[in-house]
Each structure stands twice: as structure tokens, then as C-alpha cells.
Amino acid sequence: MYALIDCNNFFVSCERLFNPSLNGVPVVVLSGNDGCVIARSNEAKALGIAMGQPAFELRELFERERVTIFSSNHILYGDISRRVMSLLARFSPEVEVYSIDEAFLSLDGISMPYGAEVYGRMIVDEVMRCVGIPVSVGIAPTKTLAKIASHRAKKMPRYQGVCCLATPDQRAIALMETPIGDVWGIGRRIAPKLLVEGVATAWDFTKLGCEYVRRTYTIGGERTWRELQGVVCYAADESPEGRQSITVSRTFGRAVTTFDEVYEAVANFTATAAERLRQQGSAAGSVMVFVKGSGCHPNRYVGALQRMLPVASDSTIELMQYVRQVLVALYRRGENYKKAGVILGHIVPRDHVQLSLFDTVDREKHHRLMQVIDNVNRQAGYKALRIGAEKGSQSWHAQSKHLSPCYTTSFRDILVVKADK
């Protein structure tokens, strides 16, 4: 059995954690430069605010309905996420962090004397008690079914946050009520084709023949079909979406022109991406850098370049060296740059890296150094220890007019409580 733990309205929940007066009122979180809505409370959803909707289109609605607005505080959200994921390790020795607000737990060999549903309820209660974040739990024999269960636990009040699809009857009802487009691994490209064929629900999909599914929708479609039947096809660290790259990018708060400013930005992006690599025990075999000029005219400069690494790496230092080489080739003097990003690709498990006879890098030394940096930053706060190229001038940082304090990672932002005698 697998359990999928999904934090409810995670970014909004992080803001409410330190400001209880936000409970019950509409709250939204905006993307970099306060551009688009990337998180909404249930109250904001009820007002018709859509995910990804530009903030400037909603100004009148924000004022009329007294919507509380926050700029995305990724430092705060990342730290709260780490607390949740660390707590989940108490419930299973195998925790697969799928995203900042989702994680799979393998329940194989776990003693659950009162059943899986009660165990899921314990997870919900413990995360709320220790971290203060509401979560939903979906439990099922496969990851694809666990995704469906988690969605039902979050959207259907009758489950009270925990949905367990342990029996064939429970799975059948869930599949009949799940639109085919909501099935993990189907995707927007395949769903319309299935609808044309009369496949409207996940249940309809399971009634197709295995040979037909394999022939028409390739091996990926067959694996999804089998997962819906209760047959495990995606084990630990596997998913139908298959993480093939890690992207970190930002729109700058102002246009930057010098090479040093652009490199400082992409160096910060590289450090963030490399940390994510190490968290999932992976290494990257390629780096790509892209830059975009300011303005909307068709002649603005847009450039991207990829570099393959001789040996896949998770070292921030080594990755930054290749990123700098790529940026040197991309950079044009006199351009005004408004956005840049780094993509780490050709990702492989760290213990499966193919070495080279001509490799001169002391990889064990790099690994130990990265462990020290990660440990220090976990204990002393975000970016307490960083590579020199990251500097910290912040000249390129996004404009965040509604940024909340970094309550858990900055001493100056620690909450002060005053108690009357």
C-alpha cells in the first residue's frame, strides 16, 4: 500500500500558520514580481479567482472582497515543507518527496493494528499538531490509485481528509467517479482522444483491453491501465510524469545589463536546483541556461544553450562552473535582461553515475562539502552558507510588495509574544 500526503492549499496554509486572523477569509499568493495567482484559499476559489490569473485583472475584486494578498515567500514555504517531510519519516522508512507539498509513503511492512484508514488519520492529526499544516491522505495499492484517493480526500468532505481505497468495491466507486482527464499519467494530450472513443472515466479506461491500450497509448498508457487495476508499475522514485529535469527561473525586479548581475542570478538558481538534486539523491548530466530581454517586441533577445557534462554531478560548485561557461556564450553586451533560468537535465540516480577514465574531479570531496553546506543551511537558516558567486546584492531580485516575514529562518523575523501579568 502507498499513502500520498498532500498539503492543503499549501502556500496559503503557510501564511495562515503565523497569522491565524487569515483563517476563514479569502487569501491569494502571487508569483514572482506579483504577476499571477499561484495559490488560493477555498474562500478565494469561491470568489471565482482562477489559478494563473494575472493580478492586475483582479485589482477591483481584491479591493471589493477584501482579499488578502501575499507575494510568494519560497524561503518560508521551503522550510515548512522540510518540517512536514521530516515528520512523515516517523510513519514510514520510505518517504518519496514528490513536490514541495506532496510525498508518497510506502506502507509495506508497517504495523497498522487499527487499519490503514486509522493510520492515515494519525498522520493528519500529527502533522497538524506538530507543524500546523492541514493535509489530506490518500491510501491505495498503487501510486496512481493513491493520487485518486488523495484528490477525493481533499475535495469530498465525507472523507474528512483521509480516503482509503483498500477493497475492490472502494476502488470501483472511485474510478467510476473520476473523470479520465484527472487520472495521473493520462495528460491533456491523451484525454481528448479517449473522450472521443467514449472513455469518460477512469473506470471506462480499465475496461479497455490491455493489448489495445499498449498498442494505442504505448507502454506508458499500459502502465497507467495496470496501476488502475491495482498492479504496481511505479515503484519508489518512479512516476508516470518521470522527473527528467529541474528548472529554476525568475523574472527580475528590474532589467539588468551587466554580466556579473546576470551571473549572480543564474548562480543562485543553480544553487537552488543543485540542492533539490541532492535532496532526491540524483545527479544532472546537463545544464541549460536561458535568458530573455525586456519588452514584448519580437526583436527582443531570447537565448538558450545547453552543455553536456562529462560526468553527471550534484555539486553546486561544479555545476556553477559549467553554467558560467554557457552564460559567457549567451551573454550580449548592451542587452537589457528581464528573465533568466537554469535547467538541470539528464537526471540519473546519484549511485548510478557513469564515471570517466579522464575525470580529475575529487567527487567524494565535493560530496562531503555539499553535505556540510546543506546541513549548515538546515540548522542555521536559508543561505547561511553559500558559494561566493551567489553574492547577495539582490539587484535582480523580484519586486515583492506583499512579502511576509521569514518567520522560521531569520532571527529578525521571529515572532515576539507579549504576555500580560
Image: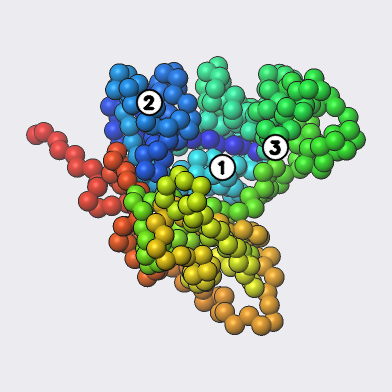
* Residue 289: image location, x then y, percent: 53, 60
Q: Is residue 175 left or right of residue 135?
A: right
Measuring 37% from the left and 65% from the top, which residue is drawn there?
A: 258
From this view, report whether residue 329 is shown above or below residue 131. below
Amino acid type, mark 3: Gly
Measure the C-alpha gap from mark 3 to mark 1: 17 Å
Residue located beneath label 1 in the image: 103
Amino acid type, mark 1: Ala
Who is closer to the viewer here, 390 or 52?
Answer: 52
Q: Which mark is residue 58?
A: 2
| Secondary-structure class at tag 2 | helix
Q: Is residue 294 left or right of residue 93?
A: left
Identity of the residue furthest to the right in this view: 211
From this view, report whether residue 152 is shown above or below residue 344. above
Dot placed on the residue nearer the N-terminal end, 3 or 1? 1
Whether residue 282 is visible to the viewer of this picture, yes or no, is no
Q: Nearer the viewer, mark 2 or mark 1?
A: 2
| Secondary-structure class at tag 1 | strand
Residue located beneath label 3 in the image: 185
Amino acid type, mark 2: Leu
* Residue 352: image location, x then y, percent: 69, 65
